[in-house]
Image (cartoon, helix red, strand yellow):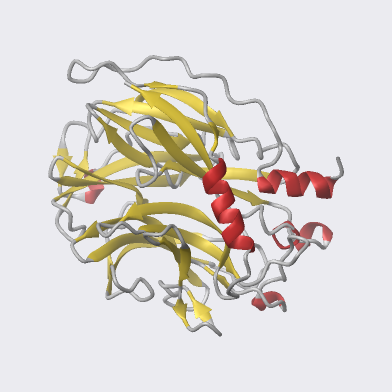
Amino acid sequence: MSKSALALALAAGLVAVPAAPAAAQAGPVCAGSPAPTFGTATQNLAMNAKFTDYGNSNARLDDWTGGDTTYSLKLSDGRIVFAYSDTFLGKVNADGSRSPVIEEGGTTPFINNSFVVQGANGSLSTVTGGTSADPEAPMPPPQAAHWYWAGDLTQRGSEVQQLYREYYDPDPGNGTSWDLTWKRNVLARFSTADLSDPTSVQAMPSAIGVQWGSALLKDGGNTYIYGTEDYTDPDSQQNTKYLHIAKVSGDDLRGQWSYRTAGGWSTRETDSVRQMSGVSNEFSVTRRGAHYIMVNQDTEYAFGAEIDISLACSADGPFTDERTVYTTPETGSWPDVYTYNAHQHASLSSSGNLVISYNVNTLDTAEDDGVNDNYQYASIYRPRYVNVPVSG
């Protein structure tokens, strides 16, 4: 198979690959209940086809054709909101390519965050800021060379509350695409009737370098806020990502946060301690009976392909008994393609099935060989969905 044919097949999820072996069935007994068991994961063909069809439809030329992050929230009225970070809009050509982005002389709009809303009838629609002719991110950059990437989101009454991470490029003129620096966390509040523009944006705890909003979970009268400390050792340059946990009483993220310490909780963010290593910048925590399930793409190895599940008896951990439930076939099957930031979608899952998404991207840009693969193959830069059977 040629490189081009293989790329298209991989991007469309058409390459058959061996499924990851069934994970060893073990785990903590919580409140007298044995741990759930997990079966062999398979591709979620319906969800993958849904977003492939939507991204390629060209029914509108100011809507989603690809993005990453991929959180979801089911609203009380039945709609499902999918939240994305970097997002391509515009047209997908008949050969599966897209024009370069406007900033590079093409016609493709590119924004740093967006929403896609699934209506009651299952149809999808894209929500951006700005206008149809000049779309902008719903959370536009606060200044030049800054942008917001999406964290997890939750509903409180008639509003959606979403944590965002602000990043900036300290040297925007050097042409390096990986030159980015985290600055702070903010909370945006949107009306459920209008996600195109927040009603308010406020600064959130950011004193210790933790990117809060990697995951959110309502449980036991509290909302738990999970964060990632993205730490690079100044001597070895080794990067390690650590889990931190906070909580707020009720469902309003503007309330007083408490932070998990080695022995309890503190209202001082500086008292927050590392809970485990190897977490992604995005993951998920959900509850199943007496157990709490963390879905995480292991970052102990750079650009790793393993999607793992860990279990706990409490929302604040400890999360143990890590097992791999899926190995992403895109990673390593074609040079430069990698996958990242897997998490479960409670909005799509059921009692017997966990629906998990992960992001796909490529390191191959025009800087390497004159061709940007995300332009040549529009379907690379889209989430993939898998089903993980679960029982118990």
**Image quadrant where one finds the C terminus:** top left
**Image quadrant where one finds the N terminus:** top right
Above or below, 287 relative to 162: above
Q: In this view, does 328 lie to the left or right of 324?
A: right
Residue drawn at x 63%, y 70% is 58
User: Which one is nearer the viewer's eye here, 14 or 101?
Assistant: 14
Q: Is residue 197 left or right of residue 289?
A: right
Image position, residue 168 (x, y; %): 49, 67
Above or below, 269 relative to 45: below
Image position, residue 207 (x, y; %): 30, 56
Residue drawn at x 52%, y 19% is 22
User: Which one is nearer the viewer's eye here, 390 or 296?
Assistant: 390
Above or below, 30 relative to 223: above
Image position, residue 259 (x, y; %): 21, 44
Which image quarter: residue 174? Answer: bottom right
Residue drawn at x 82%, y 63% is 370
Q: Is residue 53 left or right of residue 164?
A: right
- Total numbered circles: 0
From this viewpoint, is residue 279 visible? no
In the image, farthest residue toward the front = 121
Residue drawn at x 48%, y 35% is 387
Image position, residue 268 (x, y; %): 18, 50
Q: In this view, does 230 lie to the left or right of 363?
A: left
Above or below, 254 relative to 12: below
